[in-house]
Image (cartoon, helix red, strand yellow):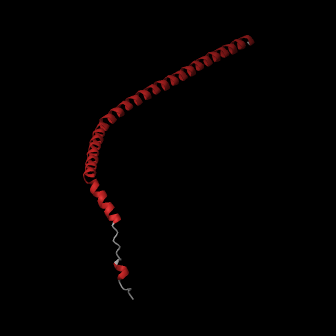
Amino acid sequence: MSAQNSKGIQTLLDAEREAQKIVQKAREYRSKRVKDAKNEAQKEIEEYRRKKDEEFKEFEKKHTSGNKKAEEDASKDADEQVKKIKEAGNNTGDKVIDELLRVVTEVKPEIPDRVNAPPKA
């Protein structure tokens, strides 16, 4: 009976080792699947990010082109205004300078009205 028990115990030990191998393979397979799923998800995320970046760039391109035109128009308008101001300065600049010099150099002292008014009681 002892030999039969020993053989039975050995069979159980062998079965346990085989079960451990199966469990180990299942763990390795599961780990590999998780790793593969993670890599695949990362690729999908990168693809999605690339796609959205392209869409954003296209959107930005469409909407900034109008801004560029508005900037060009504003710049052209500002340049015209500056040109008109310079022309006015060139045409009347001498007159303005002469008038300023005349007002500054011809002093006409006047007493303000409040100094001549009698104090109120």
Question: Does 98 appear above or below 58?
Answer: below
Question: Does 12 appear above or below 70?
Answer: above
The number of discs equals 0
Q: Position of residue 22 (x, y in %)?
A: 58, 17
In the rendered structure, the answer to whether residue 62 lies left or right of residue 27 reads left
* Quadrant of the snapshot with the N terminus: top right
Question: Does 62 appear above or below 99?
Answer: above
In the rendered structure, the answer to whether residue 24 lies left or right of residue 58 reads right
Q: Position of residue 25 (x, y in %)?
A: 57, 18
Residue at the limit of the structure toward the bottom, as seen here: 121
Q: Position of residue 35 (x, y in %)?
A: 52, 24
Name the foreground residue: 32 vs 7: 32
Q: Write down the quadrant of residue 49 in the picture.
A: top left
Name the foreground residue: 47 vs 38: 47
Q: Write down the quadrant of residue 7 in the picture.
A: top right
Question: Does 71 appear above or below 121?
Answer: above
* Quadrant of the snapshot with the C terminus: bottom left
Name the foreground residue: 55 vs 86: 86
Q: Write down the quadrant of residue 98 in the picture.
A: bottom left
Q: Position of residue 61 (x, y in %)?
A: 32, 34
Name the foreground residue: 25 vs 75: 75
**Residue at image coords 57%, 22%:** 27
**Residue at image coords 40%, 28%:** 50
